[in-house]
Amino acid sequence: MGVGVLLVAGIFAIRGSQVTDLDAVGSPWRLRAANFRAAGEMIGDHPWIGVGLGGFGEVYPQYRRPSDNETQH
């Protein structure tokens, strides 16, 4: 547990407010939230069979907004 705390403290020391600033364009939290939003929309559009195994990366560009992460797979 102590190693984990030191690791998190090191990340905050190196990246500073980039990690905690939710409004920053490149914030990892904001980018992940956009992926979850897109996934939720996909589920809403394809509730029974989904988009297929490995299909998220293929269908994601249709749900991507200009400020979203360019997901690679």
Image: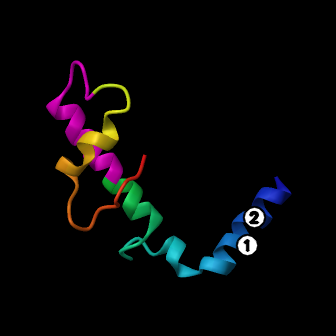
Q: What type is the residue that disc 1 sits on?
A: Gly
- For disc 2, the neighbor class at 10 Å (few under 14, some 14 to 19, many from 20) is few
Name the element at disc 2.
Answer: helix
Q: In this view, does 5 lie above or below 10?
A: above
Disc 1 and disc 2: Cα gap in Å?
Answer: 5 Å
> Would you name the residue on which mark 2 appears?
7
Instruction: Residue 12 in the image: state x and y as whole percent.
Output: 64, 74
Q: Is residue 69 above or below residue 43?
A: below
Q: In this view, does 23 lie above or below 2?
A: below
**Which mark identifies residue 72?**
none
CB-based contact (under 8 Å), mark 1 and mark 2: yes
Task: Assess whether residue 18 is covered by the magenta stretch.
Answer: no
Q: Nearer the viewer, residue 71 or 4?
A: 71
Residue occupying the point 51% across, 72% down? 20
Q: What stretch is highlighted in magenta?
A: 35-51
Colouring of the image: rainbow
Residue occupying the point 28% across, 41% down? 58
> Would you name the residue on which mark 1 appears?
10
Magenta span: helix, strand or loop, mainly?
helix
Instruction: Residue 22 in the image: state x and y as whole percent.
Output: 41, 70
In the rendered view, does 20 fall on the left or right side of 36?
Answer: right
- For disc 1, the neighbor class at 10 Å (few under 14, some 14 to 19, many from 20) is few
Residue occupying the point 84% across, 58% down? 2
In the rendered view, does 73 fall on the left or right side of 51?
Answer: right
Instruction: Residue 41 in the image: state x and y as whole percent.
Output: 20, 41
Residue occupying the point 36% across, 26% down? 53
In the rendered view, does 27 fall on the left or right side of 68?
Answer: right
Instruction: Residue 29 in the image: state x and y as whole percent.
Output: 44, 61
Q: In this view, does 11 lie above or below 52?
A: below
Q: Residue furthest right?
A: 2
Q: What type is the residue that disc 2 sits on?
A: Leu
